């Protein structure tokens, strides 16, 4: 990951308490033109634990790719962090405190 330090970083925060799959689709569209960008998903306000929103997150990750070090999720509420662990989403994303 030595080259990661040279990549621009952008932090995005979904609005509201739940993760909207439509928001993820719009974000994936925007990211398609920026393969060099490292993205930090700030979920500090997200509290939703529905299977639909988690499924949307999985589909989004598949759509945008698996480039190591490119996608970081941070500020998960403890309950949502546990859901990420149980569903093994923690293996798909780099989780930050």
Image (cartoon, rainbow, N blue to C red):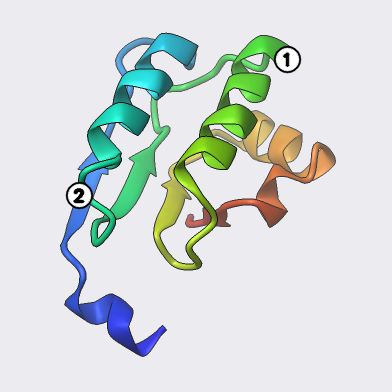
x and y percentages locating residue 53 in the rendered image: 60, 16
Number of marks present in the image shown: 2
Numbered tag placed on residue 10 in the rendering: 2
x and y percentages locating residue 88 in the rendered image: 78, 45
Between disc 2 and disc 1, whose residue precedes?
2
Label 2 SS? strand
User: Compared with residue 85, is residue 37 higher up or lower down, i.e. above or below?
Assistant: below
> Gap in Å between the C-alphas at discs 2 and 1?
27 Å
Numbered tag placed on residue 76 in the rendering: none
The foreground one among 66 and 17 is 66
- Tag 2 near tag 1, CB within 8 Å: no
In percent of the image, x 44 and y 47: which residue is there? 74
Residue 60 seen by the camera: yes
In percent of the image, x 80 and y 37: which residue is there? 87
Q: Which residue is mark 1?
A: 51
The foreground one among 28 and 78 is 28
Label 1 SS? helix
Quarter of the rendering containing residue 84: top right
The foreground one among 95 and 71 is 71
**CA neighbours of label 2 inside 10 A, class few (<14), some (14 to 19), many (20+):** few
In the visual, does 33 lie left or right of 79?
left
x and y percentages locating residue 35 in the rendered image: 28, 55
User: Compared with residue 13, is residue 93 higher up or lower down, i.e. above or below?
Assistant: below
User: Compared with residue 8, is residue 15 higher up or lower down, i.e. above or below?
Assistant: above
Quarter of the rendering containing residue 43: top left
x and y percentages locating residue 2 in the rendered image: 35, 89
The foreground one among 67 and 80 is 67
Q: Quadrant of the N terminus?
A: bottom left
In percent of the image, x 30 and y 28: which residue is there? 29
In the visual, does 8 lie left or right of 51?
left
Residue 17 seen by the camera: no
């Amino acid at each position: 990951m030595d080259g990661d330090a040279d990549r621009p970083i952008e932090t995005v925060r979904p609005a509201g308490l739940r993760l909207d799959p439509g928001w993820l689709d719009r974000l994936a569209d925007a990211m398609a033109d920026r393969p060099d960008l490292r993205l930090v998903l700030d979920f500090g306000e997200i509290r939703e634990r529905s299977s639909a929103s988690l499924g949307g997150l999985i589909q989004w990750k598949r759509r945008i790719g698996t480039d190591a070090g490119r996608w970081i999720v941070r500020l998960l509420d403890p309950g949502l962090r546990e859901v990420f662990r149980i569903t093994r989403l923690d293996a798909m994303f780099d989780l930050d405190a």
